[in-house]
Image (tube, helix red, strand yellow):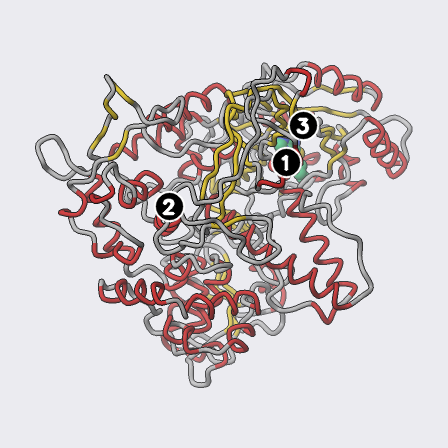
Amino acid sequence: MSDAALPEARPDLDAAADEVERLIARIVQLRDEYYENNASTVSDEDYDAMVRRLEQLEEQHPELRTQDSPTQTVGGRAETTMFAPVEHAERMLSLDNVFSREELAAWAARVERDAGRAHVRYLTELKIDGLAINLRYERGRLITAATRGDGVVGEDVTQNVLSMGTIPAQLTGNGHPDLVEIRGEIFFPVAAFDDLNARQAAAGERVFANPRNAASGSLRQKEEGKSPERLALMQERLRLLRMLVHGIGAWPVRAIERETPVTAQSEVYELLSEWGLPTSSHYRVFESIDEVAEYIRRYGENRGGVEHQIDGVVVKVDDLDLHLELGATSRAPRWAIAYKYPPEEVHTKLENIVVSVGRTGRATPFAVMTPALVAGSTVRQATLHNQQVVKQKGVLIGDTVVLRKAGDVIPEVLGPVVELRDGTEREFVMPTDCPECGTPLAPAKEDDIDLRCPNARSCPAQVRGRVEHIGSRGALDIEALGEVGAAALTQPYLPEEAPLETEAGLFELTLDDLLPIRVRVHDPETGMPRVVDGETKLVAPYQKKNGEPTKGATELLANLEKAKTQLLWRILVALSIRHVGPVAARALAAHFGSLHAIRAAGRDELASVPGVGPIIADALLDWFVVDWHQEILDRWAAAGVQFETPGHPGPGAAQVEGGILSGITVVPTGALEGFSREGAVEAILAAGGKAGNSVSKKTDFVAAGPGAGSKLTKAEELGVPILDADGFRRLLEEGPDAVR
Ligand code: IVH
């Protein structure tokens, strides 16, 4: 069942409370997964449906609305920790969708009714499956390029966007407004994508699930800490990215009409093109919605042949005056709609069903298929979730299967093509023992369908998964660790050469541990170990031919040294405690200030921290009582890992009397020099203050840096004192009186 198919509202409060609890746990888990992998196992639609359902239940039963509900906490799934925040001058909206000709006609009828016109001209363009970007130009100069983020605040990716080489730093022509935001999509061209994945696989790096992930992964890279070779690769990947612009924000229609002779969306594209911006050649203007529907039908029969992956057709009202009249909902403009094509389906061969064990011990069967091109990307594998799903789908190993993929959505095996069976197919049997360590698999709870390997401490698959997780961007961000490094450290060719039995030894690693490691070379096509003349090919990733350590070895040790003093919340995420992802970890770190204080807290205190709640509180208590977890903490501490935030005044800092900002609410906004966004928030909390997210009369100070937008305007309107980065620093050090 898809996550979106949730039961209807039930009047019974207990049942609602159960459902709320389940939804919160699932949403938090998905949000964390998104932070960690920059990808998700559910579609945006399913995720949104869950959040909407939660809002609906909270609306019906306000007593169930807790402070730590994802509907109340800041940071949608797009929140990030890597790039400086940029506030968009105008909110970046989304699009509503229709899925049939009838729904499209109904949308057009509403448009024509609301506009009071029998004849409306429509423009169609392709819906680019990429990453939404906002380019802010002031008097023709590019000031920032930012990702969409939560629609209000995105990430500053200006440098990387400029490195693409196709986005002008200075617009051509003249008559540029003081401020204009240009919206568009950055994408990875399909042809370059296949090539990139082949190279990634050959280098033993992770391959991308689809061009959209590749675009996001390429754009969201940081230069810092990269070796010259990696820097060159990063630049090369950035140059492969392309952008197409598809609209304007923060330049009101009235102003467009006043300052330029432009009155229609199609003319906007001509203007943007004159300014040197990349516009698509695939837009068309039609005189009626019937013509639009016919175009969509014809185009749908023969999608492809376009440089980028598409996930539908966007239909826009062409007349800009009507944009103004029709306006927007809080989510999307009323003058545009996305027509989504149904998911694509192809046939391919199910070569095998293999069981893999993940970081948490879950044993998941997945389909290994003959590579097939579907919805723009090559698919080789798809999860089959568990043995019951395999049964329900009725697939046999050797079957021709129907494989479905909708745009960016995860590929799914729908079922077998029974007519094509020839009798050689065989049934999949779920193993009874862990394929990696031989421990009997068992459900975690009595009626769970999922089977787990209970050998959490030593199962190589779980240790490898946890070590890889420690290095991930959402945890300690150790670039030199990664999937390949984690495998080398935990599962080299000879088990006795493995320097790590568990993650407890990670920060004790020395060159002598790394040099002897040898690993198998895998074939990027098949993923199988390469064998030449009957011998398994091996390489020593950390030792050069002359016996010297490789760059990877020295980098890994240097990265580990640096990671010891990472922020407390990142250390918490690195511990792989169930449900403790970045959101909960940040809340815990801000409230308690040290691992010691978290450990000393009781269930109620843990559960009462906004962003934590009872499920996470229990998970923490369960984690601390396991001896080998204690061993991790002891050995990491002995190796110098810092388990506290220096200067934090102790549990409940925000309420602590005597903190220099006690009783003071500060709203940070824009890029405050010398502070990351999370750094600014932590500094406020550490000084005993409250870090607000929106400006009201109760706000004591707004700390604003470049890129600040609506919060700054609001502060000006309300007369709230505004501080720049220096003022903010003074406030933190000397208190409110010094800056009032
Ligand atoms: S127009 C006010 N046109 O799809 C929003 N969006 O699913 C107007 N997208 O957020 C957006 N191709 O990032 C527009 N040709 C196109 C598009 C397009 C892709 C993205 C855009 C939007 C998302 C909604």
Residue 732: image quadrant is bottom left
**Residue 239, position as x, y percentages in the image:** 40, 26
Asked whether the beta carbons under mark 1 and mark 2 sit within 8 Å of each other, the answer is: no
Q: Residue type at mark 3?
A: Pro
Can residue 259 be seen by looking at this rendering? no
**Residue 431, position as x, y percentages in the image:** 49, 40
**Residue at x 77%, y 43% (from the top left corner):** 327
Q: Residue type at mark 2?
A: Cys
| Res 391 label | 1
Q: Is residue 644 left or right of residue 176?
A: left
Task: For marks 1 and 2, give the CA distance.
Answer: 25 Å
Can residue 570 be seen by looking at this rendering? yes
- The residue indicated by pointer 2 is 437
- The residue indicated by pointer 3 is 343
Task: For marks 3 and 2, give the CA distance.
Answer: 39 Å
Mark 3 surroundings within 10 Å by alpha-carbon count, few (fewer than 14), some (14 through 19), many (20 or more): some
**Residue 620, position as x, y percentages in the image:** 47, 67
Label 2 secondary element: loop
Of badges 3 and 2, the one in the foreground is 2
Asked whether the beta carbons under mark 3 and mark 2 sit within 8 Å of each other, the answer is: no
